[in-house]
Image: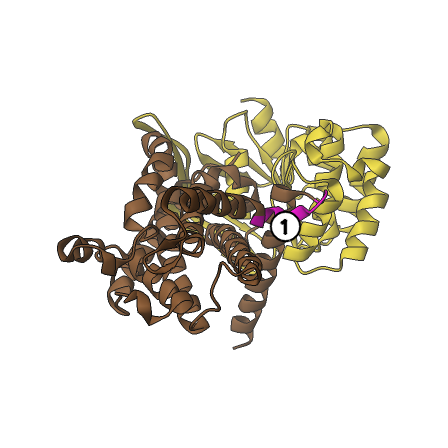
Chain colours: A yellow, B brown
Amino acid sequence: MISCVNLRKGYRVGHQTHQVLRGINLTIEPGDKIALLGRNGAGKSTLIKQIGGVELPDSGRIVRHMTNSWPIGFSGGFQGSLTGYDNARFISRIYGSELSAIRAFVEEFTELGSGLKRPVQTYSSGMRARLAFALSLAIDFDCYLIDEVILVGDQNFQHKCHYELFEKRADRAMVIASHDLNIVQSVCNRGIVMKDGVAEEYPSVREAVEAYVQM
Amino acid sequence: MASLRQGWNIQVRVIGALMLRELTTRFGRENIGFLWIMAEPLLFAVLVGILWRFMKGPIEFGVDIVAFVITGYLPLVLFRTAVNRGVKSFTANGGLMYHRQIKILDLLLVRFLVEFIGHAMAYLFIATVLGVLGFFPVPYDVGFLILGGLYYGLFTFAVMLIVASLSEMSEVIEKIIPVTTYLMIPFSGAFYLVSSLSPNVAKFLLYSPPVHGMEMMRLGVFGPSIDPHFDYIYPLMVSLPCLALGLVLCRMVRRRLVIE
C-alpha cells in the first residue's frame, strides 16, 4: 500500500507560488490499476513525481508499504552522457540486482542492438522510451508509475509493452497518467480525474472517463 | 537492527555506483581514464613548484622549495576544485533524484571523495617521484600528514556543502564563487609557515581552520624544525558547525528542487 495524505505542492514563479496540488488524498492498494486523467497542467505528472519521491511535498506525507518504480517517461532515470549499457549497469548497482539478468532483458526488450553502446543523448525519443521502459521493467517493483507519453512507439513495441506490463505483471499496482481512453478503459480498475489541484475519484473508470471527456 | 544493516548496505551500494558513474562520466574509458584525476593537480603543483624554484632559489623556510610549494599547493587545489565542483550540482544531477535511494548528500559526498582521493594520489605520486630524485624528504610522521589532510578535508567538505546549496539559491553566488576561492589562498596556509609570520598576522591567520590542517601536514612531512602552529580543537569548532549548516541548507534546497 502507498498512501498520500493531504499532499500539497506549489512551484515558485517569480514572487508568486503556483499551487499545483491542493491537498491530495490517495491510497494505492496492491494490484490497483489507477488511471490519472486530467487536462494538460492539471498536475498529473506532479502527483506521479510526488508518489515516486522525485520531488518532495510542501506539506502532507506519503506512506510507503510497497516498492515503487521511478516515474517512467522519456527523461529521468538515466544519464544522457552514458551509454545504454552503462545506464543498465548503474541501475543494477543502485538497486542491487544481478547485472547479467538486466543486461539480457534490456537487450531483448529494446532490440537496440549496438545502439546500446552509444550515449543515450544520441537516441531518438522512441529509442529512449524503449530503454526507459526496459530499465524499469528489469527491476521488480510492486507499483509502476507510468507517464503516458511512454506508451507510444511502433506497433511491435506497443505489443511488447502491453504484454510485459499488463499481462506478465498483472498483479502489480500501476498508476497511469494518460489521455489514451482506450488503454485506460481496458486496463484500469480505478479512475481519478485531476482538476484545480484536487484529485477526484469516480465510482468507476467509465464515469471518470465521462467526466474527463466533458471537461 | 536488520533494517539498519539494510540501510547501510544500500548506502554503500549507492556510493559505490555513484563513484563509478562519476569517474566514467568525467574521465571516460579512453587512454589513461580515471588517472586523469591526478593529472590536473600534478600539473598545477609541479609548474608552480618550478616557478618558485627559479624565482626564489632552492631553499624556503629551511626546506626544499619544490617540496614546500607542493605540500602547500596540492591541498589548495583540492579546496578550489572541490568547492567549484559543488556549484550547481543539484540541478545538474536532478535526474538521479528519480531513484529514491540516492540522496543529494550522497552525490556531494561522492564528488568530494573523488577529488580527495585524486589529490591524495597525486600527493603520493609526486612525493615518491621527487623523493627518489632527492627533492622531497622522507615524511617525518605520516600520522600527522594524514591527520592534517583529514582536518583540511573536513573543512573543504563543509564549505562545499554550503556553497553547493547557496549556488542553487542565487545566481549571484554561483557567479562569484570561482573568484572567492582565489581569496582563500592567504587563508589556506599554502605559501607560508605560521612561524615565519609576525605574531599579529599569525594570530589572525590561525582563525582560519585550514591553516591548522596545513601546519599539521607540514609537520608530518618536514618534522618539528619548521616550528608548526596548530590546535586540535579549534578547527573542529569551526568546521563542524559549518558542516551542520551545510547539511541544513542542502535539505532546504532539496525540498524545493524542481526536477524535469
Q: Which residue is mark 1?
A: B35
Q: Residue furthest bottom?
A: B1
Q: Is residue A102 left or right of residue A57?
A: right
Q: Position of residue B13 (x, y in %)?
A: 61, 61
Check disc 1 and report its element: helix, strand or loop.
helix
In terms of image quadrants, where is residue B132? Answer: bottom right
The reply to whether the magenta stretch includes residue A61 is no
Q: Is residue A125 above or below residue B14?
A: above
Residue at the image point whose x is 51% and y is 50% from the top:
B111
The residue range painted magenta reads: B29-38
Q: Quadrant of the N terminus of chain A?
A: bottom right
Residue occupying image coordinates x 42% and y 53%? B75
Q: Between residues B147 and B123, which one lies in front from this camera angle?
A: B123
In percent of width and height, residue B102 lies at 54, 53
Identify the residue shown where x is 84% and y is 37%: A114
Front-most of residues B223 and B121: B223
